[in-house]
Image (cartoon, grey):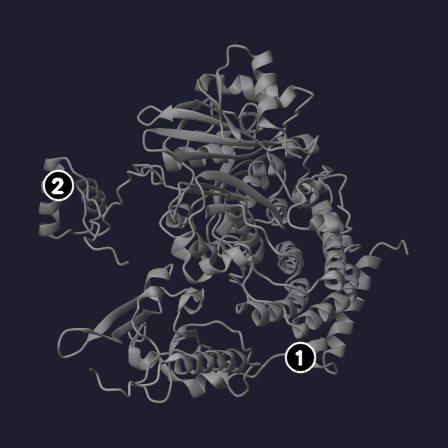
Amino acid sequence: MNIPVEEIKRELEAHLPDVKLRLIRNSLLIENPEDLTQVALFLKENPKFLLDYLSSVTGADYLNYLESVYHFYSMAKKHGPVVLRVRAPKNNARVPSLVPIYRSAELQEREAFDTFGIIYEGHPDPRRLFMWEEFQGHPLRKDYQQEDAEVLEVADIAWLEARGIKVPDEMKEKAKTLHAAGQRAVAQKPEKPRN
Amino acid sequence: METSQALKNTDAAQILEINFGPQHPSTHGVFRMTVQLEGEKICGLKPVFGYLHRNHEQIAENLPYAAIMAYTDRLDYVNALANNFGYAITIEKLAGLEVPERAEYVRVIMAELARVVNHITVIGFMLNDLGAFFTPLLYAFRERERILDLFEEITGSRLMNNFFRFGGVKRDLTGANLAAIQKIVSKFPAFLKEFEDLLTKNEILCMRCQNIGILSAETATNAGLTGPVLRASGVNYDIRKVDSYSIYDRFDFKIPLGKKGDVYDRYYVRILEIRESLKILDQALAKIPQGEIMNKKALPFLKMPRNFKPPVGEAYGRVESPKGELGFYVVSDGTPQPWRYHVRAPSLINLTILEEMCLGQKIADAIVTLGSIDIVLGETDR
Amino acid sequence: MNVFGWGVFKGMVVTFKNFATSYFRKPDEGGIFTVQYPEERGREIENFRNFPFLVYDETPEKLRCVACGICERECPTKCIHIEMETDAAGKPARKPAVFDIDYGLCMNCGMCEEVCPFDSIFMDHAFEVTAPERSEGLIRHKKELSKSNGYFQKIRPALASAVDQKRKAAEEKKRATVPPPATQEPK
């Protein structure tokens, strides 16, 4: 069963008057990210909705801002989905974490942090999920540049030499020039796409 | 939290931290857990993911919608048809495509056959983890081979089927195919009875599986678990009944529930679910109508996939895959490629409470618990 | 019965029965179903989808492919590389000069077969693709990929006959609608 999204908006505005909401297609945008925990707690405990199952937490990159999208369902009343969105600016994306209320957000928020860089405040274990800890960058952003696997950087050369591996001099020179220019070894895209 | 409590009570020098490394015969793929042991009891467990991360979501952002179908096979590689089903439903929601009657029946038949295959495979592998060295697994595989031969005749490939298309299925089922499915379905209950004679009342299985890895219903709901793991804890939530996607509301089948939520309940719930799937298959084979297998409006896109441009918007479609709720979240911006594509993988989310379920137990029990959750690494890491 | 161990005993009866009857039953009933490859081969299934191949009609010169490049564009892994042949004047002739498929990338999805408008690329059954060196044999060129229509009929009879009928019907239609040659002299 689908709950009409206008009904949810009405109930939320009646019970939580200082939360600003906007209707976008079939979802509700919470204008201020800090209100997210209040809204989620209300939707979980209100006997009309009883949305006790957080199915999916995911991020999305819309060039000017990052978005965190939540899909809620109810196992007790077998209805849903309710879609909530929260927007955050790209360079300082902080969103309150839903882990204290719904445990299913634990691994999914870690994945959104790993791939988009959205920092969830209050998460008990804010590590990356798929990439290793020293990895820099957030791969699923639209402006992510892939690193070139064949060109070594100064940090790579230091790691190799600490383990007794000899590095040829040309590669050391190239790495030094890159480091002096403040650039990273970025994979070049071919001029003509292969169709 | 329980971990730090258990750790405080022991001498730090007595704790052994080992790796259930990525190469292990019982971790169902390249899955790693760092386990802290005190003697043989577990006092801490942290799963480490990412050994099979193939960046499926970013690959999909550069491909037209139809080409992604071939990649979704490789998510849950044990039953590729469920992934195809989920993706097809999502894009049909996004673009507003209808599916003809016969195609819906074909889809349900293939999806339920894939469910049967998955459940007997999982039971076989769980018993492998228990130490029943390959006997139940190979009995299960004998039956699985029949169904995989059938998949090869219908879809062209045993595992990576790539069978569903937007608005229908790729190829029709001939009379010979339907007769073969009917033969499998009528012979399966006899095999299932033999399998149960071997396993269900076996004292060794009962002693090793009962009261292990207990999961309560509230923890399961809060942690977002779905599938047989949730139903073994007593929560009645099956997306085939709740959402009634495709034509599942025309079939008469029950949802088996467990009581205690231990490993034995999860095993038994899967056996009962195989029986319900056979019931659905019987009903579908009896009622399948004649007709076309592809929506006429979507036919031209088969030859020119670049012209398929769904309207701007987003859709979240979910199916009851044998492992849980498989969801696809697709955002389209009017171009032939999706703007954002996300897979809600049940195997990843079902592992949220792995640590809680395994604390205080022995290592051997942790392996069986992991086997009963039924993960597949292609889905967990995408 | 409530004797402790009765479940294990019943299980052992099942395994013993399976073992003993495996000598007498047929392969698909629970007997021994091992196929002694390479002396015996398994059953050949028509729709089996392995790597692609190109069809030619009578001689390898009459390849059906016109190098339109649609399969190259639609391949999800971009494993096909096509270069059109140019004749002496530099105009493109409708034939491929280079048609390479990288078997290391091909994932046997069948998209090239689905989108080809000229019925020229289909999925083969050959899975015994071997080469003496480790790095050879991964990129297949036009010569190795071209196989005759007779071979196509042999491995996929239903699909090949359907394609042949379609092509014959299209040719008949084209011959019927071509106007008769002009017999009057221009004024």
Query: Can see residue B11?
Result: yes
**Rendering coords of residue B188 (x, y %):** 74, 65
Q: Is residue B139 left or right of residue B8?
A: right
| Number of on-image labels | 2
Disc number at residue B79? none
Q: Amino acid at mark 1?
A: Ile
- Between residues B233 and B178, which one lies in front from this camera angle? B178
Q: Residue B219 is drawn in which quadrant?
A: top right
- Between residues A146 and C12, which one lies in front from this camera angle? A146
Q: Which residue is mark 1?
A: C32
- Disc 1 is placed on an element classified as loop
**Rendering coords of residue B221 (x, y %):** 65, 33
For disc 1, the chain is: C
* Local crowd size for mark 1, using a 10 Å CA cut-off: few (<14), some (14–19), many (≥20): some
Query: Can see residue B27?
Result: no
What separation in Å lies between label 1 and label 2 (alpha carbons)? 65 Å
Q: Amino acid at mark 2?
A: Leu
- Disc 2 is placed on an element classified as helix
